[in-house]
Amino acid sequence: MSGERARILVVDDEKVIRDSCTRILTTEGHIIKSAENGNIGLEVFREFHPDLVLVDLKMPGKSGMDVLEEIESIDPNVVQIVITGYATVSSAVDAMKRGAYDFIPKPFTPEEILLIVGRGLEKRRLLLESEALKVEHERIRRNMISLVSHELRAPLAATVQYLEVILGGMAGEIPSEAKEMIVRCDIRLQEMLELLRKWLNLATFDSPKMAEHFQDISLSDIATESIELMKSLAEEKKISLILETSKDLPPIKGSKVSLEEIFNNLISNAIKYNKAGGWVKVILYGREEEVWVEISDNGSGIDEEHLSRIFDEFYRVDGRRNAPIKGSGLGLSIVKKMVDAHGGMIDVESKFGEGTTFRIGFPKFFQRQKEG
Ligand SMILES: Nc1ncnc2c1ncn2[C@@H]1O[C@H](COP(=O)(O)OP(=O)(O)OP(=O)(O)O)[C@@H](O)[C@H]1O
Ligand SMILES: [Mg+2]
């Protein structure tokens, strides 16, 4: 749509309606084309690329409803207005339920059609604007991904490697004071790398693509591996890790890497936000159509007022920069996205000062979500 000049297509079998629409709308500077039946209307539509269509519902041959449906499938951003006789007002309502923007009953005055078309064109302008914003948003997202992975992560990873070579003594003896500082640099840089890894994980996550590669996965294998990985973290805080899994636990359809990510995040949280001497329990069981996972701890618990926000990106209960327990606030948003991608559901129960339980139900038989 350029400036105020819009392209409008009128499809109606009554010549008098086509002519009056053309006359009225041309005076507003719009470009009008018209067609006397649905098939011709669709042909013109494909070549003319209108901003807005006025379609009579009741025409001989192809019905107005079919024409609207085809238009919708070609370009959902075209504004559809239905022209109706008094007898077809209820079908106009049907058409609006299926996506038409408005309707105008016959006969209509010039003022009426100008008003309705004017509103429709405003809607078209908003649709095009939001489409442009989406494209811009996607462009920024891609730039950001490439910046983070090439400009930030790659040099950081190289720096960490150098530090590790130095710490390994490969570049000669290091004075103990300097060594301590290098160790601290190493830890801080590892934290940054972990933040970038998590952010990239979220930003590049493509759930339909992941679902294409789903396999049979044993959640007790994943839980066992994750607990093994977290052992040293737990030992540092003298926290016991307990796994209870029913013997005949059925497999689920899923992605190994993503399921590992889910378990690693939840178990590491249960350790991180726990006290010395606490416990973390992982319980797995099958029930009807689902396999359930419960990860509970007797740690700090989460106050009610924060509970609904912990799955938000970057949200941390203690969000201060110098908070004693470090983290990015991305872990649970990754967990949530990955559980969704497996067709599962997650909820959390927590009591401040007593502990927290995350419960996830995974469907045994994953069904791909239909588009739209
Ligand atoms: N088991 C738990 N016990 C108490 N608080 C928790 C628990 N799990 C999560 N939280 C709270 O929820 C917040 C969000 O968790 P999330 O895993 O998303 O981020 P994070 O742990 O801060 O950072 P990251 O996971 O990137 O290291 C945490 O900051 C913490 O306050
Ligand atoms: Mg976390």
Image: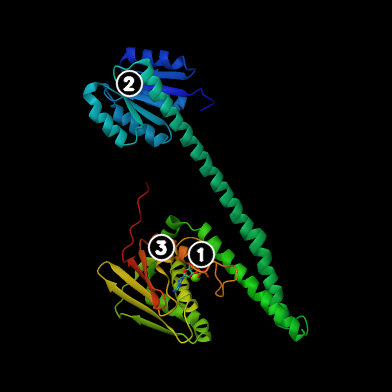
Residue 217 point in image, percent of width and height: 38, 71
Residue 361 position by quadrant: bottom left
For residue 330, the mark is 1
Residue hosting label 2: 37
- Front: mark 3 or 1: 3
Residue 243 point in image, percent of width and height: 38, 82
Badge 2 vs badge 3, beta-carbon distance below 8 Å: no
Q: Foreground residue, 22 or 223?
A: 22
Q: CA distance from mark 2 to mark 3?
A: 54 Å
Q: Foreground residue, 209 or 320?
A: 320
In the image, what residue occupies the spot 44% across and 62% down? 309
Whether the residue carrying mark 1 lies under 8 Å from ligand 1 is answered with yes
Q: Earlier in the sequence, mark 2 or mark 3?
A: 2
Whether the residue carrying mark 2 lies under 8 Å from ligand 1 is answered with no
For residue 308, the mark is 3
- Front: mark 2 or 3: 3
